[in-house]
Amino acid sequence: MTAPPDFLLIGHFTADLTPEGRIAGGTVSYAVRTAAAFGLRVAILTSSVVDEPLLAELTPYAEVISLPAEQTTTYENIYTPAGRVQYVRGVAAPITAADIPDSFKKARLVHFAPIAGELDPRIAFEFPDAWKLLTLQGWLRRWDQDGRVHFRRFDQPEAITAIGTVVFSEEDIVEAPDIEHEYAHLVDHLVVTRAERGGTYYQGGVPETYLTPQVALINQTGAGDVFASALLASLPSLNYDFRKALKVGAELASISVTRVGLASAPNAEEAAAAIKRACE
């Protein structure tokens, strides 16, 4: 990639353990397809073992730099009558500001996509001229000696403020619902997603509700990632009108839940149609 990327993703993609074997997952895997659907030049800064075969899921859509690690970040989800139990089975290398290539530093859209606490919070202070967005979930996780994932509170509000746009699900903060009120006053734009009920958008701490199209649910994995990356990726086409971008994100997330796996990310025709409808 000779020119700087339009859209930069920073975070670990994951290897998800399923009965069918290892598959690519995590925010990065869904977001890269989504951003590419908007015709943007996309780049990824991630980490994995050298010669990780799952990287092939990312490279058709972006320039990928993967920091070498002893493990690829790996998750296993076990479903029980009481709900999902999540385990971390491996974590790749941390990502710091020093790891950002010079060619990536001029990206105009930056999506911070931690999935296992891998981003040094000081990275939030990079990219002063970019529109920066954080999907928070990966900074809200810790795990015990067995690898079982538990909630933890992210305690560096200055990093949140420096990023400026934050997206998370109401499910991410079940154990600390006060985070919604706190973050609403820390950032310029906060979006709290509420699945088929739409969500709440806070601008300068003032809430308003947005709706999402109603569809038949097939699988909701990755819908939040599609929503957040579509919101960010659509901004240039919408003259940075955030409310219109919310409509784009909500529409494409609703399409994503009607499909399974990484194919739930939008294609170029769907992205263009969502942009058109948002402007009507």
Image (cartoon, rainbow, N blue to C red):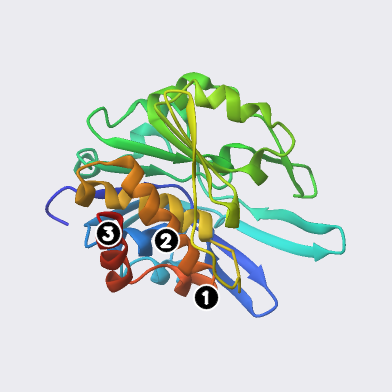
Give the Cα distance between marks 1 and 2: 14 Å
Question: Taking 72 as reference, is 162 left or right?
Answer: left
Residue hosting label 3 = 275
Q: Helix, strand, or loop for circle 1?
A: loop
Marks 3 and 2, the one that precedes in the sequence: 2
The relative height of residue 265 versus residue 27 in the rendered view (above or below) is below
Q: Helix, strand, or loop for circle 3?
A: helix
Q: Position of residue 255 (x, y in %)?
A: 46, 69
Amino acid type at circle 2 is: Glu
| Residue at the left extreme, as displayed | 2
Amino acid type at circle 3 is: Ile
Residue hosting label 1 = 259
Q: Position of residue 278 (x, y in %)?
A: 30, 55
Q: Position of residue 9 (x, y in %)?
A: 36, 49
**Mark 1 or 2, which is nearer the eye?**
2
Which residue is at 45% across, 74% downward? 263
Q: Helix, strand, or loop for circle 2?
A: helix
The relative height of residue 144 versus residue 53 in the rendered view (above or below) is above
